[in-house]
Amino acid sequence: MLSAIVSLFILGLTLGGLLGLAARYLKVEGNPLTEQLVALLPGSQCGQCGYPGCGPAAEAMASGTARVTICRPGGRAVAEDLAAVLGVSVDMAGVEEKPLLIAHIHEQLCIGCTKCFKRCPTDAIMGANNMIHSVFTDACIGCEKCFEACPTECIEMRPLTATLQTWYWPKPLALTAG
Amino acid sequence: MQLFNIRGGVHPDDCKQLAAHQPIETLPLPALLHIPLQQHIGAPASPAVRRGQRVAKGDLIANGQGAISAPVHAPTSGRIVGVGSYPAHHASGLSVPTVTLQPDGEDRWADSIKGVADPFALEPDDIAARVGAAGIVGLGGATFPAAVKLNLRKKYQLHTLVINGAECEPYLTCDDRLMREQADAVIDGIRIMAYALGVTRIIIAIENNKPEAQAAMTVAASQHSNIQIAHLPTRYPMGSEKHLVQALTGQETPARGLTADIGVVVHNPATAFAVHEALRFGYPLVARVVTVSGGAIQQPRNVRVLLGTRVQDLLNYCGGFTVQPTQLLSGGPMMGQPLPSTRVPMVKGSNGVLALTATEVNTQPSMPCIRCGSCIQACPCGLVPLDLAAHTRAGELEGAVKLGLLDCIGCGSCAYVCPSHLPLVQFFNYAKGEMAARGRAKQKQTETKRLIEQRTARIEAIQQAKREAMAARKREADAKKKAAAASASS
Amino acid sequence: MSDVASILQSGPFAHSTNTVQRTMFLVLLALTPATLFNLYLFGWPSIFLFAVTIGSCVVLEGIALLLGGRPLMRTLTDGSAILTGWLLAMTLPPWAPWWIGMLGAVFAILLSKQAFGGLGQNLFNPAMVARVALLVSFPVVMTAWIAPHPLFTDGAPDITQSIAITFGGEMPDGVTAATALGYVKTELSRGIPVSQSLIEYGRGSNLTYTPDLMDLATGYKPGSLGETSAILILLGGLYLIRKRIITWHIPAMVLGTLFIIGTAFNLLDSSRFAPGLFHVFSGATFLGAFFIATDYVTSPVSIRGQIVFGIGIGLLTWVIRTFAGYPEGMAFAVLLMNSLTPIIDQYTRPRLFGRTSKGEPLPIKVQA
């Protein structure tokens, strides 16, 4: 009787201790929040935020070391989505709203080396070996990867010009009286 | 006929006496025409002519693209001297694809232009197709392709065609003059449209400040018992499509819907006239009647201009300015757009060119909102403009949308009455534009994601194929080696 | 003249001639008859107090604007500070000392208007905030009502005496008189029924006559500097309605509610409750209904909201006058309803075109 109690007690203690140790040392790293954030980010790994890719950026945001507004290609829309998940408010005030710059290839300089379109994360550059390349402005997210890759510096980042379809009235100036 | 009350509205000074007694004149051929390829709601037309090509009046110069679009025709005979970009008839001052035509002075119609003896013998689809081919769009200013509207019978149960002759915008008199001078042609066009729509009931609605037009249309319509002439009270914005339908039928069009949802289609008298010309004579839409008016215009007039005529040519014909105007406008003072320059061409949707003096515009510096509620009384849509503006100003666009921002028709009644002279309409225009831009950004985001996933999958597939090829080669090499070893050992 | 230079600005390019200045000016104009009558009725001390109050308001507004770095001339000429000062003065005891007017201006302009961000931003009616703040801080001075002493009549103070009254704080003996509301309330607390005290009001409150309903309406009675003449205030109010500065809803609801509830309870127990007409023609009822409650900034913006607001003020005024410690309830009622204005606004938005009252699009139905 006594031996049974003692042995079961020891058994329980050992197993419990093992479980405790396992929980401590075999803890699964990874935050479900981070995954949620990654899903919201563009996923182009462009690095414009200063982090090596969208995953590290999401981790930084989840841990609170990065602001939700760091994703430039995502812009305000993504920032608002991220903020909604994290339950913080978007402060666009501190962010300079740089207009999106779109890659443009100067055709006289392009040698058709294909370096740029191999690096383009959104397949926004079309072309083939020894053919002049060109950019689909609709697909370009302005990550500047092609800009860095081009050996002849024939790529220029240009602001997207408004068209009649995208132009809209500016916000009225602040009231002078009031 | 019995009319129903509509909410809100304002009574601006209609200033129609400036041009109302001026008969429609035809502008002499200008030296150059700049014909934009997008003069309608929808996809821009794509050019069908080359530089240097000779065209006759009515020749197609650009094809409509897609379901909602309209073709563009040569307004006169001459030579194409350019296919490029030119400042648009638009407040932004942006340039748009434009065909430049140098008239040869003959104004010779193309040989292919031919009318139909009896439009009522055609199939309704044929009529819509001809209207579409003639490049006719809503000439009241909305420039929605008319053929698309004539085809609404396929999706909706229609019962009434309303002709919007309210012309509630101050100063404008072009529809008034057209109804007076071309009453029979307008009625003919209306009947053709009603036939194409398959509706029997026709209501021509004209505000009471145009008694001559009411009389002329009554006489012209007297033989057709299914046409009623409605005498509308003079109140802005009576000519807003949905409010007009409510005034005539007592029914409200559901929000975000079309008047076709309640069985009504609304067209403008000028559109009816264009339909008449297109069906009876085969003329595409190459000209329109425009009111040139305002306190700064020497001789206010109603002028029939070729599309693509520069505003400057039009102003010259009207004697230029008496004083430097404060504001040069396309359209009426309530909903019209400021024109960035007098170089811009006239387009299908421009029903007026106004040069207004400072007294007429009466712009004053903005004061803080004093919550007087005038804007709420004036809003025909039941909005609370002061709240919308406050939300917009604070950057709370989502909040503004919840309060009904997207139901705003931009009529300007609120800003007209505001004692603090707040730029309410600009707040709403900005908010609507910003919301649309955010929508586009979101769409691009999804698209980007899809592209990236595709690319990742493709790269993965390529690498997989490479690995497999390598493995295959290795197996082959091994097999060879083995075979070699086997043969060596044997 | 090929290009027209203009700032890119959205339409409309037509505006009504109405401005903030015009609105304020018309309200001042509408206040003038009643004010002139009362200045005549209460003589030089009231004229001094009136001038001091308005002057202080304008000066303080100017200082606040300067400190806030806002455009001085345009904001100062909008007339809102004058109007606030004017309304505040109209609610003060006519022979109150100068510092009451000045302190009132501090409460009204600095604490309840500029502290909230200036014109259009304040939640509470500045004149009423000031009046209530003065009333609770200086109850004796703020309830020193006087009997009518019309200018150029026997017993009216001359200029020297008036300076002593307003700037020296020397209130002569035997000039004070209770207001009808105050007298009735005091007597009731001593157990004398309302029906009896109403008859004895004239003698009991140091007046040489007993005001009848006519006197109450024309304003020949003790009361605040500008509130006594219901008829002249009504005249100004009707002018504002005609000029479309205000709508009839708030005044009609305040007066109607007060009359109905007053009459109803008077019929139930005439010894405890004063008649409806007495309520309507006493105190600041007319001034409050036409000029205080209709203040744009602090009242609801939609017609439905204004109806709720007006009924609320009528009810609260009666409740405060009847059951609370103060004989006069208008100022408190207005302030209480001011605090409800945002919530009233939220629940009384008009129905949107093409939508149900819940905001859903109307169902599609085709009628042939």
Image (cartoon, grey):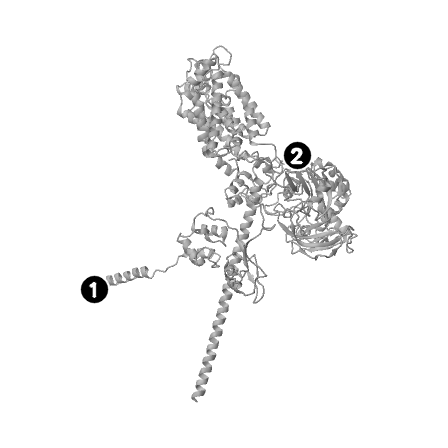
Give the letter of the chain under mark 2: B
Query: How many neighbours does mark 2 have within 10 angstroms: few (below 14), some (14-19), or many (20 or more)?
Result: few
**Residue B92 percent coordinates (x, y):** 61, 46
Q: Mark 1 sits on what residue? A: A3
Q: CA distance from mark 2 to mark 1?
A: 107 Å
Residue that appears at 50% across and 42% down: B394
Q: Is residue B418 left or right of residue B297?
A: left
Secondary element under disc 1, as helix, strand or loop, is helix
Q: Are marks 2 and 1 in contact (CB under 8 Å)?
A: no
- Which amino acid does the dot numbered 1 rest on? Ser
Q: Is residue A22 left or right of residue B197?
A: left
- Residue closer to the observer: B55 or B386: B55
- Which amino acid does the dot numbered 2 rest on? Asp
**Residue C297 percent coordinates (x, y):** 51, 33
Circle count: 2
Residue C177 in view in this figure: no
Q: Quadrant of residue B122?
A: bottom right
- Residue closer to the observer: C319 or C235: C235
Mark number for residue C234?
Answer: none
